[in-house]
Image (cartoon, rainbow, N blue to C red):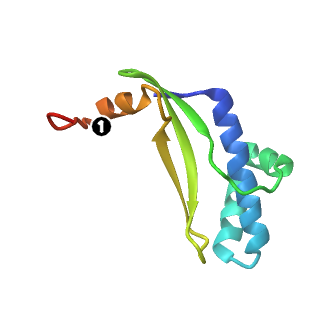
Amino acid sequence: MRVDPVEEEVFRDAIVGDLRVALVEHPDDPELVDLVGALREASPEFVERWGAARPARYRGMRKRVEHPEVGTVVLDGDVVQFPGSDVRLVVYSPVAGGRDAERLSRLTGAVDAPGE
């Protein structure tokens, strides 16, 4: 399986920007501070992105995934945030109106019941 390299770069920048927002909102969270410190120690790429990233909450994005069995599958990533919580969930779903839902169903083994 292969993800579009340009989309992957945009995603990596977005996630680092989101992490910067989290650190601004929770500067005294020791686990978060430790995570950022560990990433800075382990990854020159992270250090570069951290220095260039604009703090911005991740809102989701469209991804194109090349799968060897079904070809290109386009998915929309939407972020759901639970009220009163910092918990967020990223949900990927096939783009409406395309063949992506059918391709995804073939991968998961989902089949419609007779007559549907």
Q: Residues within 10 Å of mark 1 (few under 14, many from 20)?
A: few
**Residue 43 at least partly seen:** no
Residue extending farthest to the left is 114
Residue plotted at (68% across, 43% down): 12
Picture layout, residue 31 above or below residue 59:
below
Q: Amino acid at mark 1?
A: Thr
**Residue appearing at x 68%, y 29% in the figure:** 6
Res 101 → quadrant: top left
Residue drawn at (25%, 35%), measured in percent from left and top? 109
Give SS at disc 1.
helix
Give the position of the C terminus as an image quadrant: top left
Left or right side of 33 for 71 = left
Q: Position of residue 16 (x, y in %)?
A: 72, 52
Q: List the residue tagged with mark 1.
A: 108
Residue visible at 16% across and 34% down in the picture: 115
Q: Position of residue 32 (x, y in %)?
A: 67, 69
Q: The N terminus appears in which quarter of the rendering?
A: top left
In the picture, measured across the screen, residue 26 lies left or right of residue 89, that is right
Q: Is residue 49 visible?
A: yes
Q: How many marks?
A: 1
